[in-house]
Amino acid sequence: MKLFSLFGREKLSPAPPPASPLDEAFERHVKLVREIEDILPGKGADLFRPLALRFAAFVYDLPASQDHHHAERFGLLRHSLETACEAARIAAGRLNLEYLDSGVIDSVKTERNRPRLHYLEALVGFFHDVGKVFDVDVKAGDELWNPGQEGLYGFLERLKATDYQLGWVADRFHRHIHRTVIVLRGIVSDEDATFLGREIFLKALARLITFEASPADVTSVKTGLASPDPEAPRLKEQAFLESVRELVQVGLLKCNRPRGNVYVGREYTFLVAPQPLQVVIEHMRTVKSVYTSRQDDLVDYLHARGLLREKDGRNFLKAEVASSGMPPIVLGGVLIDNVPLWGNAVPALFSGTLSILLDPDFKFNEVGGQGKEQEGTGIGTEEKK
């Protein structure tokens, strides 16, 4: 039976503070962390969770690749944990015997180093791709993230930013291997280094800067390609179509308005680019957990999936839009098939006209200019002849 205070009420404990986005992200991956803790012997099991939390704060929600494995939000974290888990599992089956100069097994040194060498294998697997933070350009506001200075989560927290722009460095391939050591000491603690000892810690560094595709890495890559994280990525086309519909619904994309972003026709919908298309890409990333770094890559992908109409081999099109009370304007954008985009819920059609301007020199981010030839698209209720 509980005792009540003099005022007749039980004293309530204060509510716990709300979880941070980092805590929530870490919790979604904690099952892998627990698996690694269960495999690692000795002190390594105690050290790994704080190490994983520092790692998660550093890479936060970055993908592991642009269009290959683990290309979703938090893909780099998930891939790193999967590789560490598989590396720890493989290491558990090794004896890691130490020998005296005489060739006799040194049982004392073997027993002392066994948990350290096991931790080494997990650590090498965990950090093998962390250098990929230099494969991307992350910009929040006007500031570019410097991974050599701070982690991504800290960078976003410092700027009070909830979103950022992500770009991929063109000549990045395999360069991340030699960049791991730049950020390693910002994540590996003194306690980690002390536990490993000088000799084993140097082994870890040597392994990381010469890392090749290990069985643990290959296993994670295959897992990521075969069964993407069910909580994060969706098919790109699904995320794209949902994003366009949702943004139109909430009014962030202006539909069928003068100087709007979206114009709905009988068979196709014209989505203006580059800025409105970029809004869709950011919605895909932040709400749908699907990454795509470049507009032309996304448009090529959507075309390959049969969602876009091309003209003369071009996916990005130039169009003249006209409606009553508004002088004609020239816009760039893409034509999306109405059936997958709207289904049976097509909005009211654009009351004006939209005509494709056949201009072989047009670039998708160009605004203004005159076309060399015109062809009606039938996107509006009238066609421009």
Image: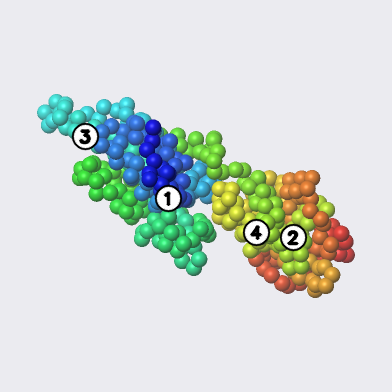
Picture residue at 42% right of the left edge, 50% below the top: 17
What's the residue type where badge 2 is placed? Cys
Q: Which mark is residue 277?
A: 4
- For marks 2 and 3, the one nearer the N-term is 3
- For marks 2 and 4, the one nearer the N-term is 2
In the displayed structure, would residue 121 be above or below residue 280?
above
Q: Quadrant of the N terminus?
A: top left
Real-space Cα separation, disc 2 to disc 4, in angstroms: 13 Å
Real-space Cα separation, disc 2 to disc 3, in angstroms: 66 Å
Q: CB atoms at circles 2 and 4 under 8 Å apart?
A: no
Name the side, left or right, on which 208 lies relative to 168.
left
Which circle, 1 or 3, is nearer the viewer? 1
Residue for badge 2: 255
Q: Which mark is residue 17?
A: 1
Tell me which corner region of the image, top left, top right, bottom left or bottom right, holds residue 32: top left
Q: Secondary structure at mark 1?
A: loop
Q: Which mark is residue 113?
A: 3
Q: Nearer the viewer, residue 358 or 268?
A: 268
Which circle, 2 or 3, is nearer the viewer? 2
* Percent position of residue 377, x then y: 82, 58
Is residue 37 in sight in this rendering? Answer: yes
- Residue furthest to the left: 102
